[in-house]
Image (tube, rainbow, N blue to C red):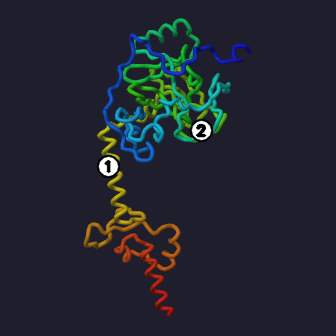
Amino acid sequence: NEVHSKPANYTHLHGLRYDPNKRPKKIPSTGEQCQCVDSCGDHCFNRMTLVECSGEGANSNCRLGAEKCDNRSLGKRQFVKCKPKRESGKGWGLVPMEDVPKGKLVQEYVGEVIDEAEKEQRLVEWSKEHPNDPNFYVMGLGSGWYVDAREFANMSRFINHSCDPNCQVTTINVKGYKRNGIFALRDIKAGEFLCYDYHFDTKQADKFLCRCGAKNCRGTMQGGGGSAEAKKPMNWKEAKSRYENDIKQLAELNKKQVTSQVGALVPAAEQPSEFVASGPPEKHRDTAVRNGIFLWRNAMRGSDFVARNSRLETSENNIST
């Protein structure tokens, strides 16, 4: 069938297409740098605030620089190789040509960047001219701006909806401008159809029926059980506070040499710092049970099981000699 032999025509883009006379304002920089040491991982202030690291030296928001930083995938366009493929009951879909690990950037949703008024006008005109075309290519970009991928786009326009998706759309600030990255929610095999939850913002749920076949299918592509931007960024103050709290807690645990603290106080304890640990390491558990050395009366010594086991062995050696 000629209609289904190839995807619909569109003009391919490598990045967002802006109207020079009507585009989003650049988001001002905080002037701060992340404090990462080895890599820009989960504790990177930029990553925590949904900002990509960029630049070099004093003008950079990253302490490590481009060579060591791994929080620049959108800016470097480090996308997974994909290809369109017919998906049963859904028209054209998109599959990766390689295995995709959880958390990896898969694609960026690109198209024409338009404002609220332009979006509404385009939707009304399209509905009148193509009343039987259910395809919808507009995605929110935040702050009253949208990406329209109907005529100008990349292959991300072929990714279908699912109520049990393997990808998620996250809006990232890249050098002062927001961009929609599509990230893997789990490990995805090569050839597996990509999908994310569209979360359509509409009151006409019956016009956007879902037949994804997932066990948790809502029956509609209308948003439900969350927002399309489920991951909301924290600000720099919150990011620093979280980082400092984590460092403080790790330091306290190292001082106490705790194996697994549950916080329960020892009965009749004289000091509030006397706690009960949840038990010895798994490799020593049989010894603990066999010799009864992890009783309530022994909990006063803390959770340093290795030391207590050593005392037990010393005692047994003295008796045998």
Residue 114: image location, x then y, percent? 43, 15
**Secondary element at image label 2:** loop
Residue 190: image location, x then y, percent? 65, 36
Classify residue 270 as left or right of residue 34. Answer: left
Classify residue 153 as left or right of residue 304. Answer: right
Q: Quadrant of residue 100?
A: top right
Q: Estimate how packed mark 1 is, as few (under 14), some (14 to 19) or many (20 or more) residues with alpha carbons within 10 Å.
A: few
Q: Nearer the viewer, residue 207 or 56?
A: 56
Type of amino acid under label 2: Val
Is the C-beta separation of discs 1 and 2 under 8 Å? no
Residue 20: image location, x then y, percent? 41, 12
Q: Estimate how packed mark 2 is, as few (under 14), some (14 to 19) or many (20 or more) residues with alpha carbons within 10 Å.
A: many
**Secondary element at image label 1:** helix
- Count of numbered badges drawn on the protein: 2
Residue found at the very far right of the displayed protein: 1
Q: Quadrant of residue 107?
A: top right
To which residue does mark 1 refer? 244
- First of labels 1, 2 by sequence position: 2
**Location of residue 96 with respect to 157 vertically, above or below:** below
